[in-house]
Amino acid sequence: MSRVPRPPHQRREPPEPVGPMRPPRPRDGEPVLPAAGTSSGGAPGAGGGPATPEGSTAGPAAGHAVPEGTRARGGGDDGGAGGAPPSGHPAPSGGAAGSEGAAARAATAPRCAFPGCTRPAAPAEGPGRPPAYCDDPAHNRLAAYRRRRELAGRGGADSAGTPAARADLATLPLAAGRLRAEDLAAQVRALAAELTCTLDAFSRQMSALGDVTAVEAAVEAAEAEAAERVAEAVARAVRAEQRARAAEAARAEAEAVAGEAVSALEDAETRLAAAEAARRQVVEHSAETVRAANDAAEAARVEADAQVQAAAARAATEIEAARVEAARRIDEAVAAREQASTRLEEARRDAERDAHTLTELRAERDALREDIRRERAEAERVRAEAAAQLDQGRAAAAAEAERVRAEAAAELDRVRFEGEARLAGERQAAAERLTVIGEARAEARARAERAERQVDELTAELRAVRASPTRPDPT
């Protein structure tokens, strides 16, 4: 007897974002700094950790302090992943492109949602949602739910602290949400450490520089890098919210499985009621059969007695024949009564077996309800942790941006003071350089004001990002 029928279609979970948010492109004339987690050649870091530009401590060159890693990265734009192929490598032919397209379609085809199954999902047979499981009858929603529970219990008891166990737990929606929230917190801490290292290098470079133009270029580069890191933090926050929504979808799927189990239990109770009605009908039929047999036996005995009293003069052979006939009828009545008793016993055993099955189904329903309650509590806890991590990341990004702006303003004030003192000394030493020094000071003031405006714009953008709701990833 099947416990839970297999549903025809299953709901698919929402896909996760493919890549991080693209950093903003620098304006014309601004120095380009390598992205977070890249080496001097512009390739992503192997570990995803902070990477300080190699040219952060170099001196000025040609009036601008451009990091060495920036120049290396600018030279690699033509051979990057998004550029044209080198001249030494021919373009792929039409057949190779067709095979690659078929392989890509096979790789993006929906897979069976049963844990550990790599077979493709069954094709849709009509309108509506496509099925999420393969054509194996054992792969359904309830079986997948039980398998995920088994994997979660096994991973937590055996090797919950190893990387392999973390990879297994990542397949579960709730555990994956917790792990991704922890990864997001680690990435935010790494960004804060990397920004601290960059600002330290910036301070050392500013102390070694005396050119106002180089100072302004470094300030603009620091502002661009801070904007890029803020955008990456916002993208990670968006992905954390999407993972929380995936955990909510998994909880809804568990509730649907519980609903199917309750429906199966109600079906079993209906079948048990039908069996009880059949048993009562058999008992009533058996009682009527026994009553009819007793009435027939009594009627036969009365008739035999009447015949004996009325035909006393008949022969002894006729009396013996009547007695044998009465005994035969009595035996038939006894056999009918024993047969009715046997049917009654079979009906009672069937009723007991159905009652035992009903008890097992009720116990399983209670276990499913308890599991659903625990899954709901776990989902709420993961959601609260993700929200706390998101708030911490936003607060840390705002604090870092405010600190960068304050340090940049202090550095600009110091450079402005030193420039004015130097101009005063040169005015006293050589009167013929007054015009040139005046023009240089005016240009320095204009660039300082532009830097201050850019710092104010960056502060306004950070406040707008912190005050506005989380935006989806544009990629």
Image (cartoon, rainbow, N blue to C red):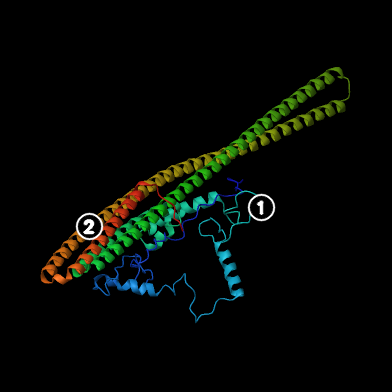
Task: Give the residue displayed 19% in from the left and 62% down from the top.
Answer: 416
Q: Position of residue 234 (x, y in %)?
A: 37, 54
Give left or right: position of 365 versus 198. Answer: right
Kindly identify the amino acid type of the residue bearing the numbered disc 1.
Answer: Glu
Residue in front for this viewpoint, 404 or 94: 404
Question: Which corner quadrant of the image does residue 165 belong to?
Answer: bottom left
Q: Which residue is mark 2?
A: 409
Task: Give the residue displayed 71% in from the left and 28% down from the top.
Answer: 290
Q: CA distance from mark 2 to mark 1?
A: 67 Å
Q: Is residue 379 above or below residue 151?
A: above
Q: Which residue is mark 1?
A: 125
Residue in front for this viewpoint, 473 or 63: 63
Label 2 environment density (alpha carbons within 10 Å; few <14, some 14–19, many ≥20): some
Task: Give the residue displayed 59% in from the left and 76% down from the top.
Answer: 93
The reply to whether discs 2 and 1 touch (Cβ–Cβ < 8 Å) is: no
Give left or right: position of 110 versus 474. Answer: right
Which numbered mark, 2 or 1, is in the foreground of this view? 2
Q: Is residue 416 visible from the viewing direction of this image?
A: yes
Give left or right: position of 6 versus 362. Answer: right
Residue in front for this viewpoint, 317 or 406: 406
Labels in figure, total = 2
Q: Position of residue 166 (x, y in %)?
A: 39, 59
Q: Position of residue 180 (x, y in %)?
A: 39, 56
At mark 2, the secondary structure is helix
